[in-house]
Image (cartoon, rainbow, N blue to C red):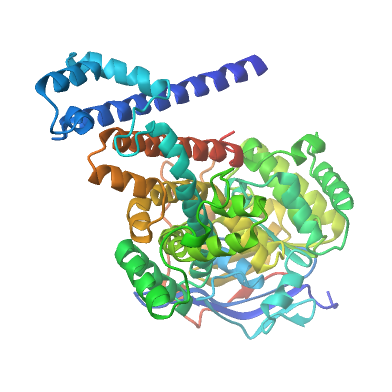
Amino acid sequence: MSKERLLNHLYALGRLLAVVLTTFLGLLLVTFLIGRVVPIDPVLAVVGDKASPEVYERARIAMGLHLPLWKQFFIYLQNVLSGNLGTSVLTARPVLEDILRVFPATIELAVTGTFLGVIIGVPLGVLSAVYRGSIIDHITRVIGLFGYSLPIFWLGLMGLMILYANLDLLPGPGRVDMFYEDIVTPVTGLMLVDSLLAKEYDIFKNALSHLILPASLLGYYSMAYLSRMTRSFMIEQLRQEYIITARVKGVAEWKVVWGHALGNCAIPLITVIALSFGGLLEGSVLTETVFAWPGLGLYLTNSLLNADMNSVLGSTIVVGAIFLSINLFSDFLYKVMDPRAR
Amino acid sequence: MTQIPLLTVENLNVTFPSPKGDVQAVRQVSFSMSNEKLGIVGESGSGKSVTGRSVLKLLPSYADVAADRMEFKGQDLRNRSEKEMRQIRGEEISMVMQDPKYSLNPVRTVGRQIDEAYCTHRKVSRKEAKERTLEMLDAVKIRNPKRVYNLYPHEVSGGMGQRIMIAMMLIPEPSLMIADEPTSALDVTVQMQVLAILDDLVTQRGMGLIFISHDLELVASFCDRVIIMYGGRVMEICEARNLKASSHPYTRGLLNCLPKINGSDEYLPILERDEAWHSDQFSVSDRSAQ
């Protein structure tokens, strides 16, 4: 019995690994091909347009671009798997190092955004499911609709114009005021955590005030999505018989709704929250550009505008890999949380 | 039977609004019961379950429920608030539903769900609640209560699930149990077993039982009195042992539809419904002792 179970687990694990590896390989193939297809000459980007043909040719051979495509892909694969994403033309540093430096800023933003989205979106969704057709349901729907349809860069610019330029309630773009930059030594890379670790409470406050607007905007998008999903999950669960059972037992209505019904929604919600978090990482390109937030999105944008292909592809791989791991993680949580899937 | 009846319902009407006009699910249903086993039988949609649920006031909020009288132990249930009803639900009146597959919360352990039923009405410690739950699981003849306590609903069989439901609904010791087709979703072989347990526990505790079913034979043998319903109306109320001898045309029709193992009839007769049964004037014939 236990041996059989172990085998089953191993089989499931093996299947999972196969899926993940295939997906990752596909991702690498796509990024590699994009790198070869774009009309940007990687050699020219390195040697500059004043180099002589001999120098150009030497650089081309040094970069392995004279080899057949499949050989190039093999070398690329070897490099990526050993953590070598190439060197950034823009910063003249290894791409991986660059990404590790800028990524925490994106994480900080996306985590805060998702957190806001969950703590507001889920309760709103529950309430609009319980009071279906009521005023709160309609308000949530309208707010959600705005969240879906307004482009984030427009909202970001509007927010900056009103709250920063006109009312001066919040600080402008960036992670901290210029004055505070580079004071805190990065430990985790997360400004809020690092400033607390360094006991620089003024910087913490400043970083928090910088974070509020972009995080709220991301949170707004996440909330719009989560409240709609929560609403439909809840409506489905509230129809179930076990809800009547709980009521027959005399259980208080708030426990029926927030305990029994939401408890059953928690499982599909995890997947949705994970997807929304992944979406925020992707969406960071626009937000970070508007707010001059020095994260992966801004790095990607800058690299793209400067034809720095190594950085662009490296960032793409990292975002893809993270998306993959988030999905993997949510699948794992699903298995842990749902007694029927164990 | 001179003491206050356990439950009295007079002229109960339940209407559900729908885009195609109102649906009258229950019309002028009246009955009264003491600590006995009262069966309610009828076809699908005859208003059996709605009658049961309106006693617990558990119909959806859009349902329009009206009655001249609805008294439980002499207390009027009609103007009870939700909060007051919660004191009655579980504690005084409880209900077992059709299929344990759907009526148990799939993500909570069986033990935790039974504990909740007990703790909602009693101020007890976790340990005490667990002890009571294990006793109760034992009372519904579950062989290894400690193991079952930690199981999830999908890990138990249908018959066991229904016994768990019964344990959960009896743990606060209510005086009235509504069993809404408690054996319809079960395998025939475990039906009798579950019924025997239900019967035992209800008789032991001297409770009232409303047994909703569409199984005439079962109700005739299991209950004390039977209400026959059709189209939301009570067709007749009679002693269960006299059911087979009923002279009411609808009841006769239902009885005739039952196939007999040794019957010589090649065709079962088709139930003939009389339009007059739908009219308000059609009187309820109460041939029972009351």
Seen as rendered, the residue at the extreme left is: A53
Residue A121 visible: no
The residue closer to the viewer here, A136 or A43, is: A43
The residue closer to the viewer here, B23 or A265, is: A265
Quarter of the image with the N terminus of chain A in it: top right
Number of marks in the image? 0
Q: Is residue B34 left or right of residue A276?
A: right
Residue A177 visible: yes
Residue located at (23% from left, 30% from top): A46
Residue located at (46% from left, 26% from top): A16
Q: Is residue A245 left or right of residue B21?
A: right
Q: Position of residue A205 (x, y in %)?
A: 59, 64
The quarter holding residue A228 reads: bottom left
Q: Position of residue B27 (x, y in %)?
A: 53, 77
| Residue A261 versus residue A322 in the image, above or below | below
Q: Is residue A35 left or right of residue B89?
A: left
Quarter of the image with the C terminus of chain A in it: top right
Q: Position of residue B150 (x, y in %)?
A: 74, 39
| Residue B143 versus residue A108 in the image, above or below | above
The quarter holding residue A336 reads: top right
Residue located at (25% from left, 43% from top): A304
The residue closer to the viewer here, B88 or A150, is: A150
The residue closer to the viewer here, A80 or B144, is: A80
Q: Position of residue A314 (x, y in %)?
A: 34, 34
Residue located at (39% from left, 49% from top): A279
